[in-house]
């Protein structure tokens, strides 16, 4: 086998030194991959949803109209993370229901869904809970949750819909599919970086809040507004840079309300309808949110200011931003090595240094593709 | 000169060429190398021992620092399981310096990540029976 010369971690580091600060692209790629929705939950969703949608279409207690059901929310928008807690399913009901009280419609839907397990069959059991605008369906033995949202459409599903709000006893406007389309276009316009940025923001929230959690949709609206208005740019920027800019921009924009103790929390407009999606954001919850934003913003800024020689310190700061869920250097190096091994380009220098990227400056030997065998703990 | 002796001379020459910091010791029909491997810039420098005896696969053990007793991909004699004997034995003909040593460096890198995450990121072929292979 001929001797192979490759560029490795050592040379890569030297090149980064020449070009400035590390922007942690491998780390963020791995973090984003780690927060993808659980494949098991996705598989469950794909198994259960057709049965539920079929049930909603055929059951006559609540009359649906063509197209009967549609998926909405973070699942079809691809902004869901981790456990994929709820999947929103729109039940498109007849417009005659607009004459009914919203709470009455929600109750009819509730009673109808009580019989869902009989229709699906098998050992499926469900726990139902009335929510403001939907019925929350928990498939207890499958650890899967669904929100069934009744909506009335004017003439087509792509228009502004009406949803019953039993808190206000009013039919209110909603435009989930319009937003889905708009987000898809915004994401495309920004090189596919908007959806990952939303995911990072939701994950950051999950890292720092058990109580006083801002809702996912509020965060999503916040992120898209900052991008759409150009307050945070995406061109040629890494996720580390964009996320840092986002935290700072959020803090700066809402600092006025924070400093004025009598001010209400900020208006977070719905991207389609402009209504304040965070209308019930409590002042104390807003203050907690801003405290975490300010703290994380400072950590992120300091991480970006580290030079390559202090990358480990930068990683530690990102660990604080993402509360220990940020990938470690060891994980990143191992994943890069595994990928290089898969591609057959992994090599090892005479010091034992594992090198993952071909180069002409470090003398090394190509490692033949192989598999580690066995596990005495099996 | 026996085939094994010829093989040993070739292995020693390749090791000297590719991993000159490894020290070699010949003992009857066994060759032993001791040397350092540092898989990444931020890694510990590990001292490893490679033992190659007539009629056996080369065996690798980590001498220093001590590694976790529950570390995966090791045989019951604590040597590293670096390849899948049923399918990858032919690769060893390339020489210890071109197979066993790079694989050992990889093992160390994956081991360091395993210490942090509990996940083995390297390619693997798990099997139910773990026994140190003694003979070629």
Image (spheres, rainbow, N blue to C red):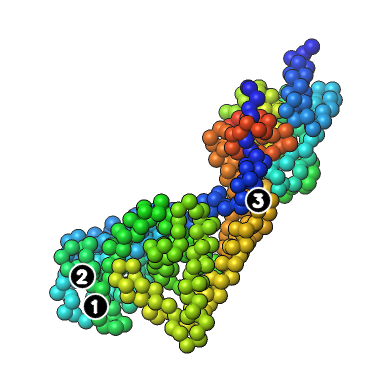
Tag shown at residue A152: 2
Circle nearer the N terminus (3, 2): 2
Residue depth check, mark 3 versus mark 2: number of the one nearer the observer: 3
Horizontal and vertical percent position of residue A270:
34, 70
Horizontal and vertical percent position of residue A173:
26, 73
Q: Please name the residue shown 61% across and 65% down the image.
A: A299
Horizontal and vertical percent position of residue A86:
38, 65
Tag shown at residue A171: 1
Tell me, yes or no, whether the two marked residues, 1 and 2, touch with CB atoms within 8 Å: yes
Q: Are marks 1 and 2 on the same chain?
A: yes
Label 2 chain ID: A
Specify the quadrant of the image occupied by residue A76.
Answer: bottom left
Circle nearer the N terminus (1, 3): 1
Horizontal and vertical percent position of residue B78:
73, 41
Residue holding disc 3: A308
SS label for mark 1: strand
């Amino acid at each position: 086998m001929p001797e192979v010369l490759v560029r490795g971690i050592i040379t890569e580091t030297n090149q980064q030194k020449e070009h400035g600060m590390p922007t942690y692209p491998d780390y963020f790629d791995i973090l984003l991959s780690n927060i993808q929705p659980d494949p098991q939950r996705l598989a469950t969703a794909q198994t259960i949803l057709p049965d539920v949608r079929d049930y909603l279409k055929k059951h006559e207690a609540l009359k649906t109209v063509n197209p009967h059901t549609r998926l909405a929310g973070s699942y079809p928008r691809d902004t869901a993370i981790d456990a994929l807690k709820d999947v929103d399913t729109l039940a498109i009901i007849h417009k005659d229901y607009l004459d009914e009280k919203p709470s009455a419609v929600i109750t009819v839907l509730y009673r109808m869904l009580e019989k869902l397990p009989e229709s699906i069959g098998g050992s499926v059991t469900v726990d139902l809970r009335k929510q403001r605008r939907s019925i929350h369906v928990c498939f207890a033995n499958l650890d899967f949750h669904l929100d069934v949202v009744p909506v009335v459409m004017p003439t087509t599903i792509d228009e502004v819909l009406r949803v019953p709000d039993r808190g206000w006893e009013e039919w209110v406007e909603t435009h989930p599919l319009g937003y889905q389309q708009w987000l898809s276009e915004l994401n495309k316009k920004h090189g596919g970086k908007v959806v990952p940025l939303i995911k990072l923001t939701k994950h950051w929230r999950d890292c720092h809040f058990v109580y006083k959690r801002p809702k996912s949709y509020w965060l999503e609206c916040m992120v898209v507004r900052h991008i759409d208005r150009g307050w945070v740019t995406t061109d040629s920027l890494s996720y580390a840079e964009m996320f840092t800019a986002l935290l700072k921009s959020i803090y700066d924009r809402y600092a006025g309300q924070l400093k004025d103790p009598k001010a209400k929390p900020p208006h977070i407009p719905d991207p389609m309808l402009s209504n304040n999606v965070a209308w019930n954001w409590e002042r104390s919850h807003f203050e907690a949110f801003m405290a975490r934003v300010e703290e994380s913003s400072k950590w992120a800024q300091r991480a970006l200011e580290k030079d390559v020689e202090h990358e480990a310190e930068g990683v530690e700061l990102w660990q604080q931003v993402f509360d220990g869920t940020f990938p470690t250097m060891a994980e990143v190096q191992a994943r890069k090595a595994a990928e290089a091994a898969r591609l057959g380009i992994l090599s090892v220098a005479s010091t034992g240094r594992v090198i993952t990227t071909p180069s002409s400056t470090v003398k090394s030997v190509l490692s033949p593709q192989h598999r580690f065998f066995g596990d005495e703990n099996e | 000169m026996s085939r094994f002796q010829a093989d040993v001379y070739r292995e020693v020459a390749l090791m000297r060429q590719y991993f000159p910091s490894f020290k070699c010791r010949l003992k009857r029909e066994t060759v032993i190398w001791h040397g350092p491997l540092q898989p990444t810039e931020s890694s510990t420098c590990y001292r490893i021992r490679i033992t190659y005896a007539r009629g056996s696969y080369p065996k690798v053990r980590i001498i220093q620092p001590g590694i976790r007793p529950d570390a995966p991909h090791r045989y019951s004699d604590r040597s590293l399981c670096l390849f899948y004997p049923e399918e990858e034995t032919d690769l060893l003909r390339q020489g210890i310096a071109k197979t066993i040593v790079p694989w050992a460096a990889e093992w160390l890198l994956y081991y360091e990540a395993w210490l942090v995450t509990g996940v083995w990121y390297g390619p693997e072929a798990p099997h139910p029976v773990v026994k140190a292979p003694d003979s070629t």
